Amino acid sequence: MNKYNFTDYFQKLKDTVDSLDTDIIENFVDRLLDCRERDGFIYFFGNGGSAANASHIAGDFIKGISYGLEKPFRAMSLCDNVSGLTAISNDLGYDEIFLEQLRLYLKPNDMVIGISGSGNSENVLKAMNYAKSLSAETIGLVGYKGGKLKELVDLCIHVPINDMEITEDIHVSIFHAIKQEIIKKLKGDDVSYGTTYDKRVMQ
């Protein structure tokens, strides 16, 4: 007999994945490709595990997807400049950490992607409201009931479960699925390697 029970977690994970609206994910992929075509910049941000996901996903766009493309995706995570984040948080307040960065960079043809399990992170909502004031494209990834973010953004991918760990797992899995579909569409690469460049590590 196993000492621990992992079955419940993995079953909830599977059931939640099965409940996702893939039409919305396809819409998201089209929007990402359109942003690339118009030379828009993509900004990712979130708190805690969602901050880690924002950095991970931005890295996938910078290297995994964009490597070898004549027209790469232009993307960054707003979670990665520690000195900037702490200065803004200390001097202006934690709720301003993403907003202040967007004030420096954001243009109307850009896209902002806020990741929040609850959908109610104040710093994410402030950044989204600013993005909407510039008519930039707004995307949200949420869990639970979706919170305020679900109603605020142009497109929301909702993971319908009251479990933060599963929400975070699925958020990054959605982006990995998107990554593979974009690679196939733009490069025709064998996605089992991520990119052609990665094949050297598989040999």
Image (cartoon, rainbow, N blue to C red):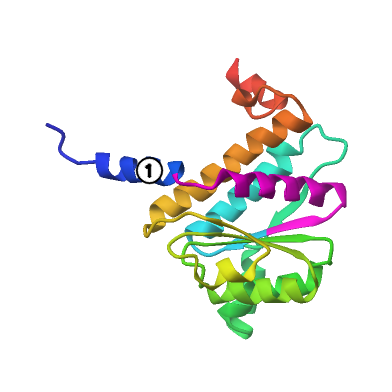
| Element under disc 1 | helix
Indicate whether residue 156 is drawn in magenta: no
Residue at image position (58%, 39%) is 176
The image position of residue 97, as x and y in percent, is 63, 74
Query: In percent of the image, x 71 and y 39: which residue is there?
Result: 63
In this picture, is 57 found above or below 127?
Answer: above
Q: Is residue 10 left or right of residue 44?
A: left
Q: Is residue 93 above or below residue 53?
A: below
Residue type highlighted by circle 1 = Asp
Residue 52 visible: yes
Mark 1, other Cα within 10 Å: few <14 / some 14–19 / many ≥20 = few
Q: Is residue 86 visible?
A: no
Q: Which quadrant is the C terminus positioned in?
A: top right
Q: Is residue 30 on the magenta stretch?
A: yes
Residue bounds of the magenta highlight: 19-43
- Locate the N terminus by quadrant: top left
Given residues 34 and 115, the one toward you in this image is 34
Measured from the top left, where is residue 62 in percent x and y?
73, 44
* Figure quadrant of residue 137: bottom right
| Circle 1 residue | 15
Give the side of residue 146 with respect to residue 136, left or right.
Answer: left
Residue 107 position, x and y percent, is 84, 66
**Side (left or right) of 2 relative to 113:** left
Q: Residue at x 63, y 84 (%)?
A: 92
Please name the residue shown 39% across and 40% down the image. Answer: 14
Q: Residue furthest bottom?
A: 92
